[in-house]
Image (cartoon, rainbow, N blue to C red):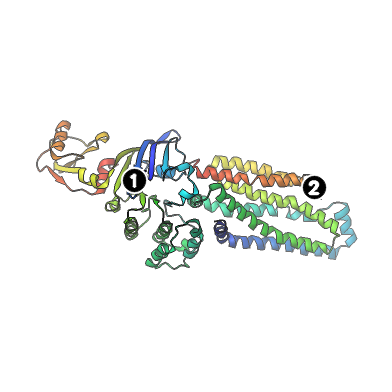
Amino acid sequence: MFKSLLYKEWIKLRIYWLLLFIVNLAFCGFLCLRLRHVFRINEAMAVWSNWIFKGYLFYRICEYVPLLLGVVLGCLQFFPETLSKRLRLVLHLPLGESRAASIHLVAGLLMLSTVYLPGLALIAVSSSFYFPPDFQANLLLTYTPWLLGGLAAYLLTAFTVLEPTWRLRVVYLLFSAALLRLFFLEDFYNSYLRIMLSLTICTSLLFVFPLLSTYRFGKGYGS
Amino acid sequence: MNPVIECRNLVHYFGSKPALKGVSWKVEPGRVCGLLGRNGAGKTTTINILNSFLTPSSGQCLLLGEDAHRLSPAVKARIGYLIEGHVQYGFFNVHQLERFYAPFYEKWDPAIYFHLMDKLDISPKQHVSTMSCGQRSQVALGLVLAQNPDLIIFDDYSMGLDPGYRRLFVEVIRDYAADGKRTILLTSHIIQDLENLIEDCIIYQRGKVLIDMEAKRLMADFRKYSFDTKGDFKDSSDDSRNLRVERGEKRSAIYGFLKPEEARAELGKLGVPAGNNFQQESISLEDMFIALTGKY
């Protein structure tokens, strides 16, 4: 059953997944080229001075990219399910409603992770040519809250889209925007280091929210 | 034997508007039951409650002995449900759909599904999104039948289908139900299609059960008597007694569970002159439905 639902989500989303994958990879490739360009036209010492000692965040440009990818994938995955109330097909399957919804979320999170990771790897590899390992670690730790923000955005999009009433959708949207703001309050190196664990736990807890919307959808709230 | 479906005093409100006003009925095992009613009579509300997609304001529905709102996966596997509008996954092709559904059902029989697809010359590679409404309906039907369920609920199966597909649909259902082992509940607005299909008939009128009886008995006992129009009288009806008088230009009629002498007596009580040529006419299930629920 688990495999079947993953199979369904794969067939449904594979084209979109590929597009998001290419877009993210292209964007990361662009960043790598830009990084190379910066080191070509500037002295390495000057760049390091700016980036390492003065804290200039070169990668700030990709701050909201994971968030955007999360929102887009959430909409592409769940909005069609609400059209013609197609979600009923899944809710009628002989397995628990929460279990069915959870498998959908796992499928989405897996896809989103596979969109993020190659891009992240590309950035890590390209930066390894120019920076010492300590700085690379800082870079990845700075990037992590943005990735968590992307995963949170995906879960909150599912939470909002699956909600059956428009009034609560608006409330959820405002709540989601406020919550996601927490992931993007600071954008200097390692600013989230101390609360990284809390942020990760907070993101994990968001998994429950779309299950609530699915339950409300299944019970016909707003019909 | 326990009923396969049982509705107990269902009440439901949409806001302050009542949709169901204390509805109770049951379907025995192996029966084909038609749930009929005008638009807004409460059929879809009932079906949604049966499928646990709606929580009633009060009352309870039991499906195969379990509360419809707490169905175990094992019981869900015994229930086939065709959603209004033949909703299916457009991104799948015929073969992929079968591959997706098969692992969920122990009694899954792919031959039933593929036989129906062959019959309609639908290729296994054809995507659902490229199909006509009629083809899509057969795909949805094939998937439901392949589950080999003990109970099938068809919600407005005829929606958007041309007469050919409607007939095919009815023939497939009839063949499937022929062994008397499956229970079928269906709703449709095309009453004439159901005439030779359903064994039990439940008719709703404004959120209440108007008729709940065997279809054969309904066809035999509910009668129409026509007579030459004479004198001044208006259309009248009495829902509590399923009685209706319709005035026509030349011929008028009285409908009800009446013998000829009872029909004459009713007309007398209403002050309607029975006139000449008082005679019983044979009527279809659709005529009965309209006589019982009104034209407008």
Quadrant of the image for the N terminus of chain B? top left
* Above or below: residue B233 compared with residue B53: above
Tell me where residue B256 appears, x and y as whole percent. 21, 39
- The quadrant in which residue B139 appears is bottom left
| Picture residue at 9% right of the left edge, 41% below the top | B276
Given the image, what chain letter belongs to the residue carrying mark 1? B
Seen as rendered, the residue at the extreme front is B1
Of A135 and A28, nearer the camera is: A135
The answer to whether residue B229 is visible is no
Pointer 2 local density, CA inside 10 Å: few below 14, some 14–19, many at least 20: some
Looking at the picture, which amino acid does disc 1 mark? Glu
Kindly report which numbered mark, 1 or 2, lies closer to the viewer in this rendering.
1
Tell me where residue A133 appears, x and y as whole percent. 84, 59
| Picture residue at 74% right of the left edge, 59% below the top | A120
Q: Secondary structure at mark 1?
A: loop
Residue bearing the label numbered 1: B28
B232 left or right of B204?
left
Which dot marks residue A193? 2
A185 left or right of B65?
right
Seen as rendered, the residue at the extreme right is A45
A35 left or right of A3?
right
Looking at the picture, which amino acid does disc 2 mark? Leu
